[in-house]
Image (tube, rainbow, N blue to C red):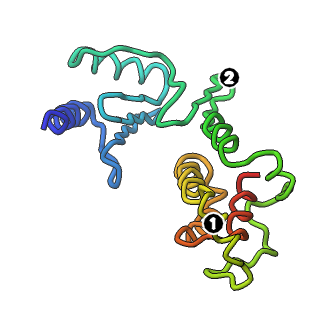
Amino acid sequence: MVSRAWYEDIQKSLHSRNFKCMQNKNCLFSKHTNHSLIIIALYVDDLIIAGTTTDVNEDKHFLNSRYVMKDSGHVHHILGCEVNCDLNTNTLFLTQRRYIHSTVKRFLNTSDLRKVGLNASPMDASISLKMVDIDEDTDRQEQMKSIPYREAIGSLLRLVAGTRADIAFAVHTCAKFSCKPSIKHRKAVLGIFR
């Protein structure tokens, strides 16, 4: 209830400053001025304000007059993503580099890398994936039980949702086989990690 009351209060405050709530995202507010666009992203009790320095400072001053706030400066991390902002070129770059490195380290060792090799794309077109591979014997099926296939798929899905939409097709294709993955499926997942 408290969080709902907080949201309703800040929503009223932002509406009073001509911010409009995005249609499909209740946590995003935007305001167009004659010369710029200001966007406020609200996550629980944190705000990220994007816009020109003048507009951001005006809105921060307004919000400071209504709420007890702490200005943490430029954003460096949000929801597991690293934020790199270059003020000289007016560019913003999101990455999940740390998460990618820890995930690759967890699921891909050097011997796996040699087996898979390096590919130009996340999914090798020559590999045909099927639900049940008749070729696989029971020893290999037992071997797959000890391999964290679902965890690898979950980690890859988090990357897709964050910053790596380019691997979405390959990840979703491999995710279809999470119930009973085979060695071929594992090799396809390792190919995504490469």
The residue to which callout 2 is attached is 88
Q: 9 or 176: nearer the eye?
A: 176
Identify the secondary structure beneath mark 1: helix
Left or right: residue 87 compared with residue 128: left
To which quarter of the image does residue 173 belong? bottom right
Which residue appears at 69% of the width and 44% of the height?
Answer: 104
Q: Position of residue 95 (x, y in %)?
A: 62, 38
Q: Position of residue 72 (x, y in %)?
A: 44, 16
Residue 35's place in the image compared with 144, above or below, is above
Image quarter (top left, top right, bottom left or bottom right) of the N terminus: top left
Determine the CA span between mark 2 and mark 1. 35 Å
Disc 2 + disc 1, Cβ < 8 Å: no
> Alpha-carbon neighbours of circle 1 within 10 Å: few (<14), some, or many (≥20)?
few
Q: Position of residue 187 (x, y in %)?
A: 74, 63
Task: Identify the amino acid type marked 2.
Answer: Asn
Left or right: residue 169 compared with residue 113: left
Q: 153 or 29: nearer the eye?
A: 153
Report the residue that reaches farthest toward the bottom: 134
Q: Position of residue 153 (x, y in %)?
A: 58, 58
Which residue appears at 63% of the width and 43% of the height?
Answer: 103
Which residue appears at 61% of the width and 33% of the height?
Answer: 92
Residue 169 - label:
1
Which residue appears at 21% of the width and 30% of the height?
Answer: 13
